[in-house]
């Protein structure tokens, strides 16, 4: 369904909403738009609506919720309140014509690879140093003390001479 042709779009939207028996609070709860924003739309207070694509989203969401065609309602809105954005449904400029480009592993920067290699080497050096420090922390005499105690225990056993 399309909004009726009238100069006062806000009034037409309000009449449609009231005919459906819904309050602004009902619409706000479903669309997650503020009641003040919806009031501004119904009063044609465009300067109180959010700018750019957000304004368009408000119009679409409101129209859809009251049973109107969102795109047709948006076009009617833009006829009365033009903005500097491209027409709905189209992107403007070279972005629209540029083909999508998939990235691949060949797009990895050589500096990133060098940085990763350096990080791995530094990590390995730290691990090796920690390993050697741990082995060096055991005193060399501790092993001799254990062997000496074992030898002493064998010689002091009864029956051994």
Image: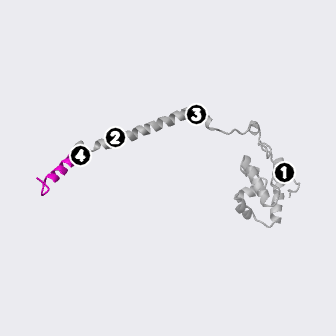
Q: In the image, which residues are magenta?
A: 142-161
For residue 6, side relative to residue 29 (left or right):
right
Badge 3 crowding class, 10 Å Cα cut-off, few under 14, some 14 to 19, many 20 or more, is few
Residue denoted by label 3 = 109
Residue contact between numbered discs 1 and 4, judged by CB atoms under 8 Å: no
Q: Of callouts 1 and 2, which one flags the residue occurring earlier in the amino acid sequence?
A: 1
Give the CA distance from mark 4 to mark 3: 52 Å
Residue denoted by label 1 = 76
For residue 25, side relative to residue 107 (left or right):
right
Q: Main secondary structure of the magenta part?
A: helix
Q: Of callouts 1 and 4, which one flags the residue occurring earlier in the amino acid sequence?
A: 1
Q: Is residue 74 above or below residue 107?
A: below
Using the image, tell me which numbered label, if any, was put on residue 143: 4
Q: Is residue 128 above or below residue 151?
A: above
Residue contact between numbered discs 2 and 4, judged by CB atoms under 8 Å: no
Q: Position of residue 19 (x, y in %)?
A: 83, 65
Using the image, tell me which numbered label, if any, was put on residue 132: 2
Badge 1 crowding class, 10 Å Cα cut-off, few under 14, some 14 to 19, many 20 or more, is some
Give the CA distance from mark 1 to mark 2: 78 Å
Magenta span has 156? yes
For residue 82, side relative to residue 150 (left or right):
right
Badge 2 crowding class, 10 Å Cα cut-off, few under 14, some 14 to 19, many 20 or more, is few
- Residue sitting at x 76%, y 52%: 45
Q: Position of residue 33 (x, y in %)?
A: 70, 57
Look at the image and tell me in which quarter the N terminus lies: bottom right
């Amino acid at each position: 369904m399309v909004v009726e042709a009238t100069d006062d779009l806000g009034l037409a939207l309000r009449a449609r909403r009231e005919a459906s028996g819904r309050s602004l609070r009902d619409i706000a709860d479903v669309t997650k738009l503020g009641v003040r924003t919806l009031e501004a739309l119904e009063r044609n207070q465009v300067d109180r609506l959010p700018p750019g694509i957000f304004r368009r989203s408000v119009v679409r969401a409101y129209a859809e919720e009251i049973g109107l065609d969102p795109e047709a309602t948006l076009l009617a809105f833009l006829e009365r309140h033009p903005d500097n954005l491209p027409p709905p449904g189209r992107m403007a400029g070279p972005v629209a014509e540029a083909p999508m480009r998939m990235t691949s592993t060949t797009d990895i920067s050589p500096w990133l690879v060098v940085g990763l290699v350096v990080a791995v080497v530094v990590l390995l050096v730290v691990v090796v140093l920690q390993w050697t420090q741990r082995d060096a922390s055991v005193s060399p005499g501790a092993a001799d003390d254990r062997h000496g105690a074992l030898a002493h225990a064998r010689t002091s056993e009864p029956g051994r001479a």
